[in-house]
Image (tube, helix red, strand yellow):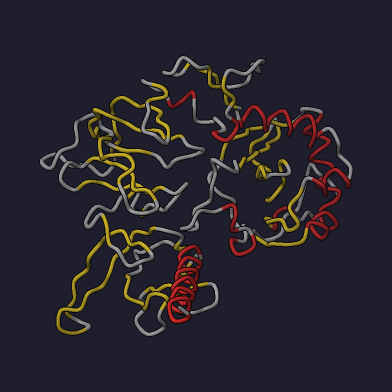
Amino acid sequence: MKKYLFIIFIFLNVSKSFSQNENQNWILYRDKNDDLIGYKDLNGKIQIEPKFTFLTSSIIFKNIIPVFEKVNIKNKEDYKTTEYYLLKNGKKVGVDSLYFFDFTLDCENEDKIRFRDPKTDKVGFFDKNGKVIIPAIYNDASKFHNGFAIVIKDAKRICWEGEEYSKENPCEHWSWKGNTQIINNKNELILDNVDLQKFQDMDWYSLKINPKEIHSDDITFKAQDENLYSFANTEKEFEKWFYNEFINKTDETNFMSNCFDKITVGKNGYIKSDEFENPEFEAYAWAFDKKENVYKNNKEFILKILEIISLKKLNINISNGFSPVLFEYEKNKSFYDNCGTYLNEKYPYFEVYITKKDSFSTQYYLGFIRTKEGYKLIEIS
């Protein structure tokens, strides 16, 4: 009896250890000699020896990653490359089915990852265990955001010049033309014939179904299930905050509370002259400094800018950007996906360009990120 209890005890502990190891993220590292990529656990223990090429872009190995494996045929000079999706237990799925967008591999997001069927040229999704959760029936698809993805069906590749893309008539720049839709996690159709222009500023993470009140700025539509879906408009939201909160309270306390601890500064922001009308700029360069130092070194300039904006003496152009210039990835990993790509849909980044109404020769720039605590200034120049 003791023998059997001992075996059960060992089995449970091994299973527990394996389970913990499976749930722990692995981190990319590079071999110093041939620059191949492998993965270590958080304790620094090697889980996969370096064997993947530089095209393998997942910094964090959570559940499933796309890889390019360098396989020797005879020696280091004579090799072939295989591509597939890899699970932590070593299982390979989706061989030769890697999904690319703009020459970049996909990354696991919301426990799903895209793949492209090489036979049909259609896109689907694997779940975190490598099982097909959404079949490859779409010409293309976005990542999932809060359980929703934008997909396109029955489409053709159209060259920017207007002709249809083909092997006989290839072109460098093209886009899909077809039926754009919104689907959910279960591959259920939420909205058909989507006009992307109306949804480009939609906050996917603000969903309200059949809300009691609908704000005039919200993006609202009746879904296929007859429910009313309402989402916040991030650009409208930012504009109101910018003019009502950031600009109208031009004091040091307000400025400091609406900044990241460190700010990227274009050194042309450091003004030597006291005259706003005739500033003298230092040589252009970027710097990354504590917000206290930024304010101290640019106090008059910052307050003057805010004052003039509030008086509407400048032209203001606000747009949704892609990613901040010098945002420290290592200290702000939650703002990035497992491949180090900035999560703009979750943390919208806005660029504010400011020019004098009578002249476009002088331009100022402010960059903001929406965080869990609200909008924060991250760049100024």
Closest to the observer, 57 or 92: 92
Closest to the observer, 261 or 150: 150
Which image quadrant for residue 169?
A: top left
Residue at 35% x, 76% y is: 36
Closest to the observer, 276 or 378: 378
Q: Looking at the figure, which quarter contains the N terminus?
A: bottom left
Instruction: Decide: is 167 above or below 271.
Output: above
Residue at 22% x, 74% y is: 71
Closest to the observer, 314 or 163: 163
Residue 368 spot, x, y in % from top left? 67, 44
Residue 286 spot, x, y in % from top left? 64, 60
Which image quadrant for residue 11?
A: bottom left
How many marks the image carries: the answer is 0
Instruction: Decide: is 103 above or below 220.
Output: below
Q: Is residue 242 rendered to the left or right of residue 324? A: right
Q: Is residue 167 rendered to the left or right of residue 194? A: left
Residue 12 spot, x, y in % from top left? 47, 70
Residue 93 spot, x, y in % from top left? 27, 57
Instruction: Decide: is 154 above or below 43.
Output: above
Instruction: Decide: is 180 above or below 227.
Output: below
Q: Taking the image as drawn, is residue 381 in sight?
A: no
Q: Is residue 352 rendered to the left or right of residue 190? A: right
Residue at 30% x, 63% y is: 91
Q: Taking the image as drawn, is residue 338 in sight?
A: yes
Residue at 24% x, 27% y is: 154
> Which residue is outermost to the front?
1
